[in-house]
Amino acid sequence: MQIRSPSLVELNAFLAVARAGSFRRAAQDLHVTQAAVSRAVLRLEQELGQDVLQRTSSGVVLTPAGTQLRKLVEKPVAALHAAASRMRKTPERLRLRLSVITSLGTLWLMPRLEAFRLLHPEVEIEFRQYHHDEDFTRDDVDVWIEVPRGAMHRWPRHIAAQYLIGREIVAVCTPELARNLHTPQLVLAQPLLYHSNFPDNWSLWAQARGAAMPVHRKGTGFDLGMNLIEAARSGMGVAIVQQCLAEADLASGRLVMPVAGSASTGRGYFVCRRRAQDAHPAADLFAQWLAQRASMQPPG
């Protein structure tokens, strides 16, 4: 069966803007970002092949097509919401408490989180402070996203850990710096930026490229991946980073890979949950969604 109707996400975004008269107020009503509402309406307009909203100096107004669409879909959408409310066994909001390693949370998870909120508005997410030396005994966290502390790391027996993303590392720098870096050896002659917890990442990259590490290398170490990315943006040198942390900068062209190819660290980020945890629908939904988003990661 071919589905030709717009999604409920897109229709809900359109109706919210139609009622509120602005994208900002619609976003507040839906508890999502203004950008998420704007993108949903844009997808709707692209699917219909015509504009449904017109932006003016005083706000947002419906086009003739938008007025017709609102008349056609407002009651059916409201009826679907009413039916779901009647059938839902757990009408209360589901709480999910997360502890996420800082750089992954900022650079990879946050840009995607609005998509989860649109799909599952019934889930209320609370971020808890990330602890560097986590022992997984806290009772204020339902799901952790963590990185193992070494190649031989073993998770505690009471924790089930599932690999998510982040094993692949790449070399990145500004386009200006990359202009004359055509070979791995030229890259390795530059100031080499690295994560201070994983100083051997450059050696892994060099080995994967068939290159030799310089005897006296120069560079700077950073204790946070997000600071490492920022240093590369500022032109301090070439950074070795997890590809998932740099994907937005690579997509925008703010950073580039002077030499193509990645290397594997064998580590990456893991979704961690207590094995003895009671049934937790919100955690199940989030873990499934994370796995789906990670599978959409560009190849190394």
Image (tube, grey):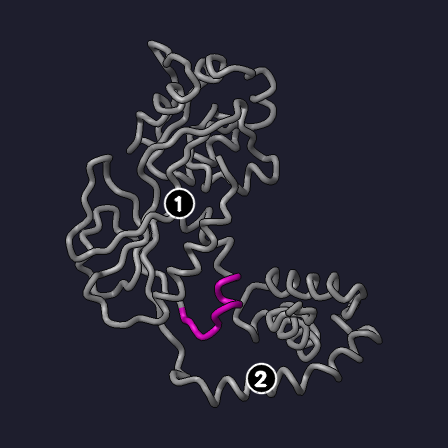
Q: Residue at x 28, y 55 (%)?
A: 272
Q: Which residues are magenta?
A: 115-124
In front here: 176 or 200?
200
Mark nearer the N terminus (1 vs 2): 2
Residue 79 spot, x, y in % from top left: 60, 88
Q: Residue 195: horizontal and vertical position, in percent?
A: 35, 32
- Could you tell me how far apart the alpha carbons at marks 1 and 2 are, in whole angstroms? 36 Å
At 46% from the left edge and 87% from the top edge, which residue is drawn? 87
Between 288 and 226, the one nearer to me in the picture: 288
Amino acid on which disc 1 is placed = Ile
- Image quarter of residue 13: bottom right
Residue 264 found in image quarter = top left
Q: Residues within 10 Å of mark 2 (few under 14, many from 20)?
A: few
Q: Quarter of the image containing the N terminus?
A: bottom right
Residue located beneath label 2 in the image? 80
- What residue is at 70 percent from the left and 77 percent from the top? 18
Q: Secondary structure at mark 2?
A: helix
Amino acid carrying label 2: it is: Leu
Image location (x, y in percent) of residue 181: 55, 17
On whether residue 146 falls in the magenta region, the answer is: no
Q: Is residue 119 magenta?
A: yes
Residue farthest front in this picture: 1
Picture layout, residue 293 above or below residue 154? below
Task: Examine the rendering and report whether any part of residue 25 can be seen.
Answer: no
Residue 165 is labelled as: 1
Residue 161, image x, y percentages: 27, 52
Bin the neighbour count of mark 1 within 10 Å (Cα to Cα): few under 14, some 14-19, many 20 and up.
Answer: many
